[in-house]
Amino acid sequence: MNPASTLIEARNLVKTYTMGDMTVHALRGVSLDIAGGDFVAIMGASGSGKSTLMNILGCLDLPTSGEYRLAGEEVEGLAQDALASIRNRRIGFVFQQFNLLPRTRALENVELPMVYAGVKAAERRVAAIAALQRVGLGERGGHTPSELSGGQQQRVAIARALVNHPQLILADEPTGALDTKTSEDIMQLLTELNAQGMTVVIVTHESDIAAWARRKIVFRDGLIVEDVRQAGHLAMTSFEAAAAPGKAKELESDPNLSTLDMAQGNGGRIPIPGSEGSTGSQAIAESGSDPYSRSAQGAAAALGRPEQGTAPSGGSAAHAVASVGVNLT
Ligand SMILES: Nc1ncnc2c1ncn2[C@@H]1O[C@H](COP(=O)(O)OP(=O)(O)OP(=O)(O)O)[C@@H](O)[C@H]1O
Ligand SMILES: [Mg+2]
């Protein structure tokens, strides 16, 4: 693979949690490359390590050992502010429970990542409206989450994730709280974003949802046990499909869509010698947390309104800035 096109390079990722006498081996040595522009679904039983991997890929947590490069940047060993900067520049997060500020209008929820960056109000309003239009909610900016359906709330969350034009969208069970039809709409939206160039990685328990992706990775007990290319749904909007009718055939005959069953847990990649010895076991953030809701209190303060009961405590404004501040240029 051309290294220039590799967005995610993970080698021998190990994540071990110690709780009293008990040790949990959440990841046991995961190696994985994801090319820029790919659309990947991660499956596996509960507790198999999917979210643990997503937290590491999202620079929300560090592995106990192993190496991770995102767009060529070494992640392990970086200080928190540098990690926050990588997150803010490169990654949009989408979660099962949407994680919107409940008493805050859709527009301001979407503006949140820009608030901390000090983007001027008028400028961020324009960007938030554009992001909401992109997810089909241009008319709903004035609604609070409770005035929106689950699918619409997830669209707002996706607008928030993409407002900073990230290269990578990480979505941990984005359809887990949605009905089948709404789930399809969300997958259609993610497919369109992927067609527009964003790399998309989702975690799902549902085969129907995983089928939208062009690569499926299966976890078992902290290891990759299967890694296959698949057709996916055509990653084209209806507009593009009409403009390029030959593309569907081209995709169908793509030789890269062959099956690569992985017998072993390293995803078939060649481990980098010495990566076992690397350090970086310190957690950046509480595992399982997300950069938007963790900062809800600070966010609400920045937006100039109280927002109660929305976030785990401890999200100071400074922390929030580090978590979701963005660098708009
Ligand atoms: N902060 C933590 N402290 C201790 N153990 C943890 C922590 N986070 C995850 N684990 C453990 O690590 C293992 C992997 O958890 P993880 O959340 O990655 O699973 P998952 O595949 O996402 O599961 P699910 O499908 O239920 O979301 C589990 O055994 C879990 O209990
Ligand atoms: Mg999980």
Image: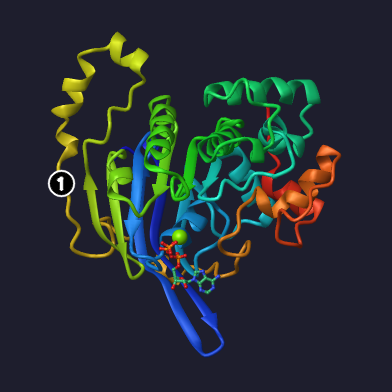
Tell me the crowding category of disc 1: few under 14, some 14 to 19, or many 20 or more residues within 10 angstroms, Cα based.
few
Q: Nearer the viewer, residue 91 or 206?
A: 206
| Mark 1 sits near ligand 1, with its Cβ under 8 Å away | no
User: Residue at left 79%, top 52%?
Assistant: 308
Residue 264 image position (x, y, % from top left): 22, 65
Quadrant where the C terminus lies? top right
Residue lying farthest to the top in this orientation:
243
Residue 320 image position (x, y, % from top left): 74, 50
Residue 327 image position (x, y, % from top left): 68, 35
User: Residue at left 57%, top 32%?
Assistant: 159
Quadrant where the N terminus lies? top left
User: Which amino acid type is shown beneath numbered disc 1?
Assistant: Thr
Q: Nearer the viewer, residue 326 or 181?
A: 181
Residue 158: quadrant of the picture: top right
Residue 112 image position (x, y, % from top left): 71, 38
Label tally: 1
Is 316 placed above or below 39 here?
below
Q: Which residue has dot 1 on it?
A: 259
Residue lying farthest to the bottom in this orientation:
21
Q: Is residue 12 visible in this depiction of the protein?
A: yes
Is 217 placed above or below 104 here?
below
Is 148 placed above or below 53 here?
above
Colouring mode (rainbow / by chain / secondary structure / one colour) = rainbow
264 relative to 27 in the view: left or right: left
Q: Is residue 70 visible in this depiction of the protein?
A: no
User: Residue at left 27%, top 42%?
Assistant: 211
SS at badge 1: loop
